Image (cartoon, grey):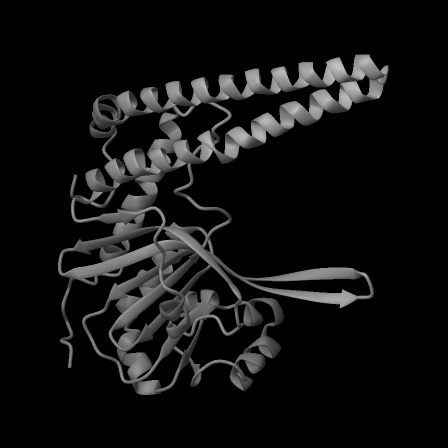
Amino acid sequence: MTEHKQINESEWAAFYTNELLPVLQELDAKRKKGLNYAIIAGLIAAAVSIGFAIAYEEAIIILVGMIVALVAALVGYAIGSGGSLAKQYKDSINHTIAKWIEPSIIYGQNSLIHASDFDAARIFTSRHNRYKGSDCFKAQIGQTSITWSFLHVQHVTKVKSGKNTTTHTEEIFKGLFFLIDFNKHFNHTTLVLPDFAQAAFGWLGQKMQEWNFTRPGKLVKLENAEFEKLFVVYGEDQLEARYILTPVMMEQMVNLRRKAGSQIHFSFRKNILAVAIEKNSNPYATPSVFSSLIKEKHAKNIAVEIAANCNIVNNLDLNTRIWTKE
């Protein structure tokens, strides 16, 4: 499958039945076997605790012992066998789906966009000290290379007061982060960010944007009312920012924002377009190992997500080479 527009239902049904279902059935059999072993181990441990409780005539120990034994067995399963199953699921199911969507994709479940690339985009100004991620995809869509991964970026502060410690966590970014070849070397940075201030505070919000103490460059005003409602633009060079953000590009960015259904950030710097799409959770995560892994809907959601991510190149028309790298 090389078209990155919409998944064909009949093609998906055949692919799922022939390629994914046999693997899912095998993985689910392993899941059931491991879960059964965990339950048996928990029951044995509970029986031992009951024996001790009877010997010492402590009824409360029976209840506590049974609960602790079963919970310990299930937690051990989730960490041990469950973790192994999650890895196998991604190695087989996610990888197979990715190759079906786009044969050029290279997928690494434990790989992620490097922190230096995240920082270089200059989208987020807060400093981070907790940087995690997974599920990195690299592909060549036509003439355009694209790399993306799930990221969860935070800044964690611990404050001690006597014997107590308070932990404060600032959420900087959670979602999918993309690095896309733009086929043009820019001398300056242009940022297109969600417009929170003007949407919330109107005229005062616009003034706050103009003051801009943290972003590179100055506020760039453009002649697209719908674009201006959704985004605020900062550019180190006004002419270059307008050169990039043509009427067609602005319309495409608005459409991409609608398709994403969540806040989206753009950075044009050097020859890279960085895109950050906010997500509440990792769309490539494995289903719970405490229930059946044979879930066609979950697998299809992964396929739809990968197709949509590949299609960003087409949505922004990045294979139309109107510029050359200089």
Q: Residue at 49% x, 46% y: name it.
A: 281
Nearest the eye: 19 or 253: 19
User: Of residues 52 and 33, which is closer to you in this image?
Assistant: 52
In this rendering, would 176 be left or right of 73? Answer: left
Residue 249 lies, in percent from the top left, at 28, 67
Q: How many marks?
A: 0
* Quadrant of the drawing holding the N terminus: top left
Q: Residue furthest right?
A: 57
- The quadrant in which residue 243 appears is bottom left
Residue 286: image location, x then y, percent: 42, 36
In the displayed structure, would residue 174 be above or below residue 213?
Answer: above
Outermost residue toward the front in this view: 55
**Does residue 311 show up?**
no
Residues 320 and 1: in front is 1
Q: Residue at x 25, y 21 (%)?
A: 17
Q: Estimate the x, y position of residue 93 in percent, counting from the top left.
A: 30, 34
Identity of the residue drawn at 61% across and 78% down: 204
Quadrant of the frame with the C terminus:
bottom left
317 sits to left or right of 74:
left
Placement of 175 over or under 101, stated as above or below? below
